[in-house]
Amino acid sequence: MIHFAKWKVILVLAICALGLVYASPNFLTREQAESLPGWLPNKQISLGLDLRGGSHLLLEVKVEVVIRERLEALVDSVRTALRKERIRYRGLGIEGNAVSVNVPDNADKALGLVRDLDPDTAVSLAEGGRITLALTEKAVRDRRSAAVEQSIEIVRRRIDETGVREPTIQRQGDDRILVQLPGIDDPERIKKLLGKTAKMTFQLVDEKTPLSEALAGRVPPGSVLMPNTDRADGPMILVRKRIMVSGENLIDSQPSVDQRTNEPVVTFRFDTLGAKRFGDVTRANVNRRFAIILDGRVISAPVIREPILGGSGQISGNFTFQSAQDLALLLRAGALPAPLTIIEERTVGPGLGADSIAAGKVASVVGMALVVVFMVVVYGLFGAMANVALILNMFLIAAVLSVLQATLTLPGIAGIVLTIGMAVDANVLIFERIREEVRLGRTPISAIDAGYRRAITTIVDANVTTLIAALLLYVFGSGPIRGFAVTLSIGIMASFFTAVWLTRLILSVWIRRVRPQALPI
């Protein structure tokens, strides 16, 4: 017991020192912590929505739109395949989760053509030459799941671009996304950003058909009327349905200012494939108008004056600098696979969070004070040593939460308060075992050594079982339950270290210096 390996001494002291250093930024204001030199720890504990205040949004992904788009693409593929082989057809359209078409002649040949268009469809032929291509249940399920996962990633990118600190973004149910934004009291801009699909396409303007005919209801089969936000040609504009270049090929977009007009614009840049397509389209359509379409609205329709071969360009329109910045942000983050709708919104004021923090501080201080008094009254000097370990335990918990940037919630504070009580359990077991050894007539050194050696098995069993329970809460729980599990898990590991290793080191130093004839316990 008196001999404590040097490497153990160094390890224990190093862990304690690191805990104090990494926990110290929490005693500073956020501005003071951020102004610290880069080589010093400056991370503070991330406070959750219930402590810091902010906005809570529950979004629903309109996954039906993804299925619909896939079926529309399948309709185009069927039309192209049948026209290429000059097979007559009629009644081509969407019915439920399937595409149907009537082929009065050459139905068997048409069946062979469309069978290989999409491996995720089941193709059948009915009487009268009616062919049906239905998406399989697995295909529908996979596309729904992929749409939600992709939406979560796009939402995360968009929110990260706005500079919101420590957002919580997670899936809830089959088609919903939970978004919590600590510190955001007015989420209107965030809601606008999340509410836009930001699906950008580049399509040619239909200049052969007079707009008046299209407005009268005579829209050609390959064209579509779209709202025109630029309003240079009126509220509506006729564009070709075929997508020449997709926004999926964009790799960067930035707000800028047009040097000629001093108006805000958005510059964009394509990847290699997008640059080639963009160059080919502009080369083949010089002096034609090229519509830039965002979420089904034409935001600009400039004339192609010359081929654009560099893979970059700019979008002009009635932009303010803020709207140009938001559009650039949306394009950088990528398009949502399906629209999002806000089905629940709550705002938590910072005053309520401050009250929760104050209540948590009071609970922690009172709990620690009672434990400290109890340990000193019952175990005397040994209890005081355990109290030193308890205080360092709190610093270690704060340090780990700061380094991991784990979000601290109100249930998390409850986990810390519970840890305060549990942190001295190991010391109580050890001290009671030492008392038993003293009653049996052992010497102080022998009694301490036996107390630690015989209590360690019980301590390990108790901590491991509690840690397993905390891990299960984290895996199967969500939100507040996870916050409680995180702080409880960190507290268990920290208390095991301080109660067993740190108190043993303190007792070892005390035994060497004092060499008592009897133990004050």
Image (tube, rainbow, N blue to C red):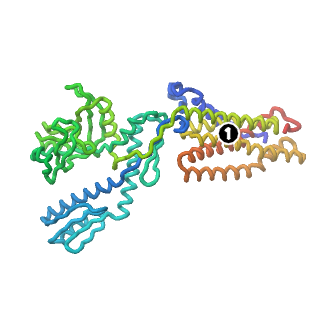
Task: Say which of 338 and 424 sits in front.
Answer: 338
Does the image show residue 404? no
Please indicate whether residue 504 sits to the left or right of residue 280 in the image: right
Q: Can you say whether 138 is above or below 404 in the image?
A: below
**View extreme (front): residue:** 216
Residue drawn at point x = 38 percent, y = 58 percent: 142
Return the residue nearer the eye: 214 or 125.
214
**Residue 84 showing in the rendered view:** yes
Q: Is residue 16 left or right of residue 184?
A: right
Which percent across, then down, holds residue 418? Answer: 67, 43
- Total numbered labels placed on residues in the image: 1
Amino acid beneath label 1: Trp
Q: Residue furthest bottom?
A: 127
Residue 104 in the image: state x and y as whole percent: 16, 71
Query: Which quadrant of the figure contains the C terminus?
Result: top right
Residue 380 position, x and y percent, is 82, 36
Instruction: Say whether residue 280 is left or right of residue 361.
Output: left
The picture places residue 208, in percent across and down from the top left corner, at: 9, 46
Residue 118 lies in quadrant: bottom left
Residue neighbourhood size for the residue with mark 1, other residues' Cα within 10 Å, grouped as few (<14), some (14–19), many (≥20):
few
Secondary structure under tag 1 reads helix
Q: Residue at x 17, y 48 (%)?
A: 240
Question: Which residue: 47% across, 50% down?
Answer: 172
Q: Which residue is mark 1?
A: 7
Which residue shows up at 22% across the image and 46% down it? 245
Quadrant in the picture for residue 310: top left
Quadrant where the image shows the N terminus: top right
